[in-house]
Image (cartoon, rainbow, N blue to C red):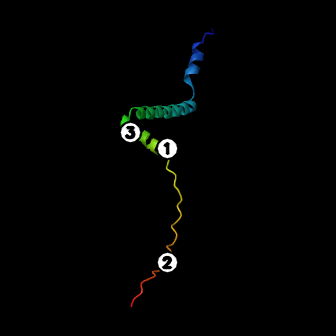
């Protein structure tokens, strides 16, 4: 194993400010994402079950809709009186 001198160690741990700014920004974003995930997992189960129920209702099979023809127009009624009057 190679030994590292003190001067080499200083250059490794020093870095540059531009790289540190980019790394700091990425680490801050990652930390925020981790906090969001942790808070989402710590929410009460009631909210999670409501989401599950809504998903189940949305995914259930819908009844098929049948097309029904309109009823035919009624035929005219003709009243015929067969009585003979005197």
In the drawing, does residue 8 fall left or right of residue 80?
Answer: right
Residue at 52% from the left image edge and 52% from the top image edge: 64
- Judging depth in this view, the residue of 64 and 3 nearest the camera is 64
- Residue 59 is marked as 1
- Residue found at the far right of this picture: 2
Q: Which element type, helix, strand or loop, lies under badge 3? A: helix
Q: CA distance from mark 3 to mark 1?
A: 19 Å
Q: Give the label, 1 or 2, closer to the camera.
A: 2
Q: CA distance from mark 2 to mark 3?
A: 62 Å
Total of numbered circles in the picture?
A: 3
Q: Which residue is mark 2?
A: 76
Q: Quadrant of residue 16?
A: top right
Residue at 53% from the left image edge and 64% from the top image edge: 69
Q: CA distance from mark 1 to mark 2?
A: 49 Å
Q: Position of residue 21 (x, y in %)?
A: 53, 33
Q: Position of residue 58 (x, y in %)?
A: 47, 45
């Amino acid at each position: 194993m190679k030994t590292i001198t003190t001067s080499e160690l200083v250059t490794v741990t020093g870095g540059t400010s531009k790289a540190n700014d980019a790394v700091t920004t990425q680490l801050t974003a990652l930390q925020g994402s981790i906090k969001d995930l942790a808070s989402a997992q710590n929410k009460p189960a009631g909210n999670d079950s409501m989401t599950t129920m809504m998903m189940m209702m949305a995914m259930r099979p819908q009844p098929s809709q049948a097309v029904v023809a309109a009823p035919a127009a009624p035929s005219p009624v003709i009243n015929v009186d067969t009585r003979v009057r005197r």
